[in-house]
Image (cartoon, rainbow, N blue to C red):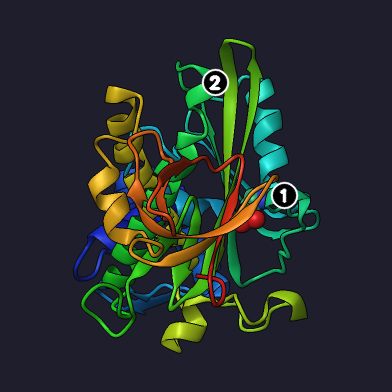
Amino acid sequence: MKTEILKLLRETDGYVSGQQISERFGVSRTAVWKVIRQLQEEGYQVEAVRNRGYHIVDSPDVMTKEELDSLMKTKWAGRNILYYDVTDSTNLRIRQAGDEGAPHGTLAVADRQTAGRGRRGRAWESPAGSSIYMSVLLRPEISPFKASMLTLVMACSVAEGIEKSLRDQKTGGAGGTLPPIQIKWPNDIVLNGKKLAGILTEMSAQVDYINHVTVGVGINVNITEFPEEISRTATSLHLECGCTIRRSPIIASIMERLEENYETFLQTEDLTGLMDRYSAMLVNRGRDVQVIGGKETYQAHALGITPIGELVVRRADGREEKINAGEVSVRGVYGYV
Ligand code: BTN
């Protein structure tokens, strides 16, 4: 009921009376009052005015299942939420949920991870109260060879979702005081030349059949200190805009963008419908990059991406190559981008 009351308070411009709430949900006014008290204890600023009722003035950075449920506007993305104050890794929770038959679009969110995992076997530091750690379960009926493109679909959704939510939270974003959110190919989210978020995609598949895909996203939101080894290349929304950002609306906004982008992806089973937007956000485009492969490392000029998500680069001798994210990584010549 907390979720429904929160939704109603948000949807109502003025005050909503205790009587209206109790009639709408068929509960006593005492029960309504108890929920309002709980919300206030969680940090929501709910004004209670005699003879008028309740009015929500401000929602702090609350991350609970009820808060997330009350913000979700999608059909399937994030409609089944597994919320954890602490868990080992949301990717592991989603993999397990997938094995146990959870529906497409199931979302796991944690306030803290004890075994957060990054790409290439690295750890992903996941302290409490300051960042987003979330993973989504996808059940695409496509060839396993095409699954790596889902990472780029998510990158596009994360960048667009953050932009949209920052605009709604009136903290800058596109056209505001913050520089644009960008993507470092294939799937790092970048702000002001530093890493803001990372994506880890894992798949459970047979040779020709995908059981399920887990797409995990870590976003630095209100965190202000990073481990020494990444402190020069990482940033957070708080560090860049100097204000506290609410995490739950960002998650809801990313789920909206993911739902639409995923459906566009499925129409062609490639990135044709997303390429223009992805390319517009691509920080590498038009820059010199280091291509770091198993056999060789070379310098090249990044031109853009192909419909299947390869990066097109031009070598110094003029040869163009399409590079695959699984085989090489790309850095800026002078730094992270
Ligand atoms: C990267 O190395 O850039 C990818 C980082 C992905 C981190 C996220 S946090 C939520 C999810 N759970 C994990 O254990 N990892 C991903």
| Numbered marks: total | 2
In the image, residue 181 above or below residue 304: below
Could you tell which of marks 2 and 1 lies nearer the N-terminus?
A: 1
The residue pinned by badge 1 equals 120
Query: For the point 28% across and 78% down, which residue is it?
Result: 170
Residue 218 visible (yes or no):
yes
Image spot of residue 81 (x, y percent): 54, 41
**Whether the residue under disc 2 has CB within 8 Å of ligand 1:** no
In the image, residue 178 above or below residue 258: below
In the image, residue 171 above or below residue 269: below
Q: Secondary structure at mark 2?
A: helix
| 227 lies left or right of 2 | right
In the image, residue 332 above or below residue 318: below
Q: Looking at the image, which is closer to me, 285 or 102? A: 285
Image spot of residue 274 (x, y percent): 28, 42
Q: Secondary structure at mark 1?
A: helix
Q: Amino acid at mark 1?
A: Arg
**Mark 2 neighbour density, 10 Å: few (under 14) some (14–19) many (20 or more):** some
Image spot of residue 107 (x, y percent): 54, 41
Q: Looking at the image, which is closer to me, 120 or 238? A: 120
Q: Looking at the image, which is closer to me, 23 or 150? A: 150
The residue pinned by badge 2 equals 144
Could you say which quadrant of the image residue 49 lies in? bottom left
Residue sitting at the far front: 317
Image spot of residue 7 (x, y percent): 34, 54
Q: CA distance from mark 2 to mark 1?
A: 20 Å
**Whether the residue under disc 1 has CB within 8 Å of ligand 1:** yes
**Mark 1 neighbour density, 10 Å: few (under 14) some (14–19) many (20 or more):** few
